[in-house]
Image (cartoon, grey):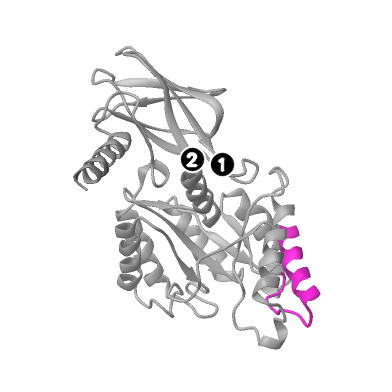
Amino acid sequence: MKRTVLLALVTLVLIGHVVSAADGPGTTRIARWKDDKACAFSLMFDDSIPSHIKNVVPELTKRGFTGTFYINPGSGQYAANRQVWEKEIPASGFELANHTMTHRGGATTDDIAKEIRSCNDVIHATTPGLAWPRLVSWGQPGGIKPEAWPVTKEGLATMLSENHLVSRPDFGGRGAMIAFKTGPEMLAHVDKAIAKGSMECIIFHGVGGDWIATPLPVFIELIDGMVARKDKLWVTHHIAAHQYATERDAATVSVASSTAAKISLTLTCTADAKLFDRPLTLVTTVPADWTTCSIDQGTRHAEASASGGTVRYEAMPGSEAIVLTKLAKP
């Protein structure tokens, strides 16, 4: 019994040794979220309505934030601003997501499949420079009568898989003006995500107009509070957070070699590289006398400063070695 306990303690020490940033040069951990932030948080907006263009996009842009917009390309409100939705918003780095073509459902499963596929086709057409297939965020439209949504849970799962759609977190408990009605309530949700280290979101309809509308001052209070927490928050698209988490959980980093002037690492990942193609943030322990270093991986090159005996940087999972080289002090 004592031997078993001793072996268990030794195992825990070794695990701690592998992940501890205070260990010897070359010890590397994969950050839980990009840039070693505490959590990933997404702002999501349903129904492609005018207040998103009038109020949301300008306010997010002012603060350097992004958002995920669940569009209905066959709706009248989308058609009235088609140029903005299909040109300006994607060009500004916002994410378009699938909310079905019309938000009206259909009489048959084939109708539902067409609603989903047609919306994906529009999103594809707005980003011709990106390789397809690729992952797209999915938000099931609410408020549709059961007879207009004649698809089983299993049937829907098949449709989503066929279209490379990833379901966002459930609307329940995350809807603005339903689960949260004030800025402090929304920020409490943000703080819970920070404490848990999770991926979370708030889902909006109108902002300063339209339906289920969040008053603009409430929305501004939220995003200003998020600015104040920016050192802990990765404010990002839903798919970016999903890709990062999937790769992180399927990745392994190991030290190939380590000297006083150079460290070589490998970063492998079992996730499908065609769909999961984001860099991961790594934190590597370096010798105490390192102040800056270069990071090279294939054609990728960057330089980074050492802080507290570690260097933080991004690397792509794959077969190419990651090489950190000490740079001479200026």
Is residue 77 visible from the viewing direction of this image?
A: yes
Q: Residue at x 40, y 35 (%)?
A: 282
Q: Quadrant of residue 158?
A: bottom right
Q: Where, quadrant-wise, is the C terminus in this rendering?
A: top left
Nearer to us in this view, 161 or 36: 161
Locate residue 68 relative to residue 186 in the image: left or right: right
Tell me the crowding category of disc 1: few under 14, some 14 to 19, or many 20 or more residues within 10 angstroms, Cα based: some
Q: Kindly give the residue lying farthest to the left in the view shown.
A: 2
Residue 183: horizontal and vertical position, in percent?
34, 71
Q: Which residues are magenta?
A: 101-122
Rendered position, 163 above or below 258 = below
Three-letter code for the amino acid on which mark 1 is drawn = Thr
Rendered position, 89 above or below 320 = below
Rendered position, 191 above or below 23 = below
User: What residue is disc 2 on?
Assistant: 251
Rendered position, 193 above or below 19 = below
Q: Secondary structure at mark 2?
A: strand
Nearer to us in this view, 262 or 232: 262
Residue 130: horizontal and vertical position, in percent?
68, 44
Residue 39: horizontal and vertical position, in percent?
37, 53
Q: Secondary structure at mark 1?
A: loop
Three-letter code for the amino acid on which mark 2 is drawn = Ala
Q: Quadrant of residue 160?
A: bottom right
User: What residue is disc 1 on?
Assistant: 270
